Image (cartoon, coloured by chain):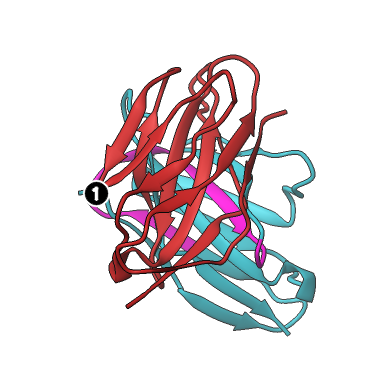
Chain colours: A red, B cyan
Amino acid sequence: GNSVTQMEGPVTLSEEAFLTINCTYTATGYPSLFWYVQYPGEGLQLLLKATKADDKGSNKGFEATYRKETTSFHLEKGSVQVSDSAVYFCALSGNTGTASKLTFGTGTRLQVTL
Amino acid sequence: GAVVSQHPSRVICKSGTSVKIECRSLDFQATTMFWYRQFPKKSLMLMATSNEGSKATYEQGVEKDKFLINHASLTLSTLTVTSAHPEDSSFYICSARKTGLSYEQYFGPGTRLTVT
């Protein structure tokens, strides 16, 4: 079955530091890949996505590239802000049929300090 | 936007009682809604897929008689935890997918259930 593995947190960074959160996956076929963010007290929000190999998703300064050869979708940001403190979830969904079920990683908490 | 609400945000109930959680899409119609359960420091686990006007599809290992799902309209799905026990205590999250070709899911803020 499908699975997603992401690095355990928490990750603590100073403001303006470079961020990488690793994510690797196991799936059959050609899944779509997602990063969701959950701010304190709020629901999950889609941060970015990529639907095929070599696609790069980007939003709010965050980027992730769909690497089929390494089955990875690592999240990066060049300069984090305190407001980026949240829990980040890597996820995938199969592209077959309309079920589009999401399989999530365990989430990585990011804490950014001044 | 695409806003999904859940009610209540927190609920405490006694063992043996039932509790209902509502999931509403506030500004769009959702043919399909999903119910997830999140354990501490664990990923979200899909419990069931709810389709408007039809029976929900449950994931393997999820008791359909214990977790009753109703999706009576295009903006409302409910999850009822029947005869709750302490091991049902968890964070329950719903998501909704817009009617049409979009596959994106919009998530609610979650409901914290504590069974005493």
Q: For the point 70% across and 76% down, which residue is it?
A: B17
Looking at the image, residue A14 sits to the left or right of residue B57; the answer is left
Chain letter of disc 1 in the image: A
Front-most of residues A30 and B57: A30
Looking at the image, residue A111 sits to the left or right of residue B74; the answer is right
The amino acid type found where label 1 is placed reads Lys
Q: For the point 60% across and 36% down, which residue is it?
A: A24
Work out whether residue B33 can be spotted: yes
- Give SS at disc 1: loop
Residue A114 spot, x, y in % from top left: 32, 78
Residue A70 spot, x, y in % from top left: 59, 24
Q: Callout 1: 10 Å neighbours few (<14), some, many (20+)?
A: few
Looking at the image, residue B88 sits to the left or right of residue A68; the answer is right
Residue position for label 1: A60
Q: For the point 33% across and 23% down, which residue is it?
A: B101
Above-or-below relation of B103 to A48 = above
Residue B18 spot, x, y in % from top left: 66, 71
Work out whether residue B52 can be spotted: no
Looking at the image, residue B46 sits to the left or right of residue B54; the answer is right
Q: Which residues are magenta?
A: B22-41
Quarter of the view holding residue A53: top left
Residue B95 on the magenta span? no
Above-or-below relation of A93 to B107 = above
Front-most of residues A93 and B114: A93
Labels in figure, total = 1
**The C terminus of chain B lies in quadrant:** bottom right
Quarter of the view holding residue A101: top right
Residue A28 spot, x, y in % from top left: 65, 18
Above-or-below relation of B10 to B55 = below
Above-or-below relation of A54 to A72 = above
Secondary structure mainly formed by the magenta segment: strand
